[in-house]
Image (tube, rainbow, N blue to C red):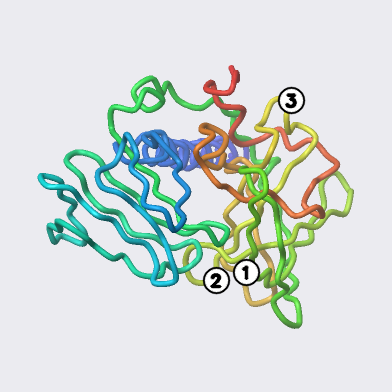
Amino acid sequence: MTTQVTTTDLQAFTQSWLDWYRAQEERLADPHGFLAITGLHWLDERPQRFPDAPGAWWTDSAGVSVALADGEELVVEGTPVRGEHHFGVLPERGGVDAVWGNAVIEVAKRGGNDIVRPRHPDAPLRTAFAGTPAYAPHPRWALTGRYVAFDEPRPTTVGAAVEGLEHVYDAPGRIEFELDGRPLSLTAFPGHGAGRLTVLFTDATSGVTTYAANRALTVEAPAADGTVVLDFNRAANLPCAYTDLATCPLPPAENRLPVAIEAGLKIPRERGGA
C-alpha cells in the first residue's frame, strides 16, 4: 500500500511539473513573447527611426513620444493613433504594448532607460524554437525553507544582462533552507501575485548544464510561521537565456549558491544546450 501511494504521489508530482513546464514553453513561444523580439532600441532626445517599427521615436522630460509618418498607424490600448503620439513618463519595469499590424511594439522603461522593443511573430528565433532542455523532476529538489522578513525592505542593486545597466529591487527578506545538511540562504525579491516571492540565483551547474547568468524561482506566499517551499524543479530561465535583446537582472552576490542544483531548466538550445 505504501509503495502504491508513493507511486501515485510521484505520478502527480511529475504531472504537475509537466503542466508547469508546458506553460513556461507556451509563454516563451507566444507570437509576441520574448523569442519574437527583433530589436532593443534605446531612446534619447533625438528622434530615431528603426527598421522593425513605424515612426520616429524619442524621449525627454515628458516621456516617450513617436511621430508617425503618413500611412503609418499604431493601435494603443485599442485606439488607432496617427501623427504624433505621446506615451508619457513610464514607470520603472512598466510599459505599453502598441499594435502594428501583426506585430507588437513594446514601449518600456528598464534600468531608468526608455526603450522600444518590437516583437514580430515571424522572428527567426521564435519560428525555430524547439523547446528547452530540462532536468527530470524529482521530489528531492522540493525543499522546505523558512522565510525571514527584514525589519524594513532593503534596496538591493543588481546588475543586468546588458552591460552597464542596473536594477534596484526592495528585498523584503531572505529564505533559509538546508541541502544535504548544509545551511544556505537566498535573498528574495517581490514576486507576481499577493505575497509571492521571486528568487534569482546561480549555483555550481551555472555555465555547465544551466544558463550561466541566472535562473529564477517563484515561491508561493509564506505560511503564517514563515514556512515556504523551494521547488527547484521549477527553476526557470529568464529571457536573456535565449536572446541578447533582454535586460534581465542578475542575482545579488549572496545568491550564488556553492552547491549544484541539478534541477529545473537547462541551457537553451539557442545557447548551445542539448
User: Which percent across, then down, holds residue 215?
Assistant: 64, 43
Quarter holding residue 166: bottom right
273 lies left or right of 125: right
Identify residue type, mark 2. Answer: Gly
Q: Tag 2's secondary structure?
A: loop
Residue at coordinates 40% horizontally, 70% vertically from top-left?
89
| Up-down relation of residue 209 to residue 36 (above or below) | above
User: Which percent across, then down, holds residue 165?
Assistant: 63, 52
Residue at coordinates 31% horizontally, 65% vertically from top-left?
87
Residue at coordinates 57% horizontally, 54% vertically from top-left?
218
Question: Are dots 2 and 3 in contact, CB under 8 Å?
Answer: no
99 lies left or right of 250: left
Identify residue type, mark 1. Answer: Pro
Quadrant containing the N terminus in the rendered view: top right
Packing grade of label 1 (10 A; few <14, some 14-19, many >=20) is some
Disc 3 target residue: 208
Q: Calculate the distance from the C-alpha at mark 3 to the C-alpha at mark 1.
A: 32 Å
Discs 2/3, front: 3
User: Which percent across, then down, holds residue 38?
Assistant: 39, 34
Badge count: 3
Residue 195 circle label = 2
Among the two numbered marks 1 and 2 on one chain, the one whose residue lies closer to the N terminus? 2
Packing grade of label 2 (10 A; few <14, some 14-19, many >=20) is few
